[in-house]
Amino acid sequence: MTTSHFTILLGGNITVTDRLQKAVAETRVIAADSGMRHAQPLGLAPELWVGDFDSSDTALRERWPDVEQQPFPAAKGVTDGEIAVSEALSRGATRLTLVGALAGERSDHALFHLLYAVSLAERGFEVVLTSGDEEAYPLMEGTSELDLPSGSLFSVAGFTALEGLDIDNARYPLANFALAFGSSRTISNVAEGPLRLRLQSGKAIVLARPYDLTGA
């Protein structure tokens, strides 16, 4: 397989949806520790399994005896997820779908994944984070379009102050808006179909719930 689109299986919880299955179809797959448990429900066959394996039980490891394993010590300076992403980049990844990045017992890991996604986007990589129920997209300077169903909830969370923010095709559009750091002004909007955003300066993440039509 020569695709440069990699799926990284992380340890957070997921919901298997049609949208998630479509997102990971025909991708190359690397699992990070207990993220391997998502492979079977999604019908994926990872080419590599990395981590310290402290959260992978014996049954899970025995279920995938033929997958190449790359073990690391528990006392290390990076997460299993970052190791998996680094391995994908070394194998030619330009596009990354991080599955299980947004939910689970460890909010510190979820926050790291959001910040890491923005840093990857700054380096020119296309990144999507997903739990199936929720998706996240780094928002960088320039123009972006997100293919969201009409009626789905979304929020823009600034990691810095934002300048020149435009939100089009949404219930609450904005034009050339300055968002103060820490402001909740851009929380809980509703997409009216594919969402168009523009940003002059700043760093942010768009959190979207494509199956949540409670705001419709």
Image (cartoon, helix red, strand yellow):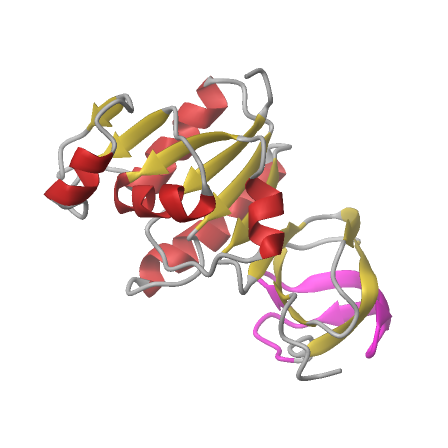
Q: Is residue 205 magenta?
A: no
Please provide percent x and percent y for residue 172.
82, 79
Can residue 166 be seen from the camera position used here?
A: no
Please provide percent x and percent y for residue 11.
32, 51
Please provide percent x and percent y for residue 14.
43, 58
Q: Residue at x 74, y 48 (%)?
A: 141
Q: In which image quadrant can residue 122 be found?
A: top right
Q: Is residue 3 left or right of residue 67?
A: right
Q: Nearer the viewer, residue 55 or 40?
A: 40
Q: Is residue 41 left or right of residue 125?
A: left
Q: In which image quadrant can residue 60 be found?
A: top left
Q: Nearer the viewer, residue 155 or 96?
A: 96
Instruction: Give the quadrant of the N terminus.
Output: top right
Q: Give the extent of the magenta segment.
A: 156-184
Q: Is the residue 67 above or below the residue 55 in the image?
A: above
Q: Is the residue 129 above or below the residue 88 in the image?
A: below
Can residue 154 be seen from the camera position used here?
A: yes
Q: Is residue 161 magenta?
A: yes
